[in-house]
Image (cartoon, rainbow, N blue to C red):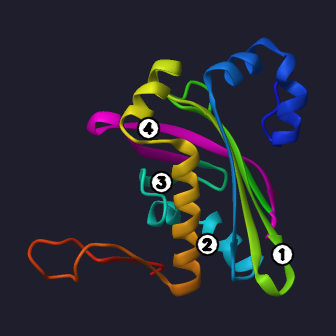
Amino acid sequence: MTTYANPRNKIKASRSPQAETFNKKGVHVRRAYTVNKSASDLFDFWRNLENLPKFMTHLQEVIVLDEKRSHWKAKAPAGTSVEWDAQIINEEKDKLISWRSLEGASVQSTGSVRFIETGDRGTEVRVVLEYIPPGGQVGKLVARLFGEEPSQQIQEDLRRFKQLMEAGEIPTSQGPRGTCGSKKSRRTTS
């Protein structure tokens, strides 16, 4: 029995050989950030999966295939990229989105994002992600050598998400548009 819809179920399922392999070779990340916006606003923005590359710098693109399925393309070490298909497996409006990669995907992953209202402080956004990097343990080591620590990466993604949702843009260290070959200086919600 392997259940990925809920990370709590994943713990119960960890006795199966497949889950144990996933746990031994995989990466487990759990991070949270409080954003001064309603759960509804945050959920709606995140649920439009094509918005994710706006604040997740490792994602090159997400293409929505239908109501539940999507195609993902992400940066990988040494200037390469990796692609896979994923499916939303559980959704509660304004509260939860959980997903897993489809069978045969080059990246085996499962995860969830929860939106928890905290009253006058906004909404706590909790991300749980488990995945097996391409190449297993070797891929995990190579990613770390290239400075791609998953836990730190997710924390930075959440920080950028907070900036984007609260201010409407993500400040960068690049100069203003039109100066000496610089790129666009801010990512925006539009």
Question: Tag 1, which secondary structure?
Answer: strand
Circle 4 is placed at which residue position?
Answer: 83
Residue 45, disc: 2
For marks 1 and 2, give the CA distance: 16 Å
Q: Is residue 85 magenta?
A: yes
Circle 1 is placed at which residue position?
Answer: 117
Q: Nearer the viewer, mark 3 or mark 1?
A: 1
Q: Nearer the viewer, mark 4 or mark 1?
A: 1
The residues colored magenta run 70-95
Mark sitting earlier along the chain (3/1): 3
Left or right: 95 with respect to 37? right
Question: Tag 4, which secondary structure?
Answer: strand
For marks 4 and 2, give the CA distance: 22 Å
Left or right: 112 with respect to 6? left
For marks 3 and 1, give the CA distance: 27 Å
Mark sitting earlier along the chain (4/2): 2
Q: Amino acid type of disc 2? A: Phe
Circle 3 is placed at which residue position?
Answer: 62
Q: Amino acid type of disc 1? A: Glu
Residue positioned 52% across, 29% down in the render: 133
Label 4 crowd (10 A; few <14 / some 14-19 / many >=20): some
Residue positioned 50% across, 46% down in the render: 71
Q: Is residue 188 visible?
A: yes
Q: Quadrant of residue 109?
A: top right
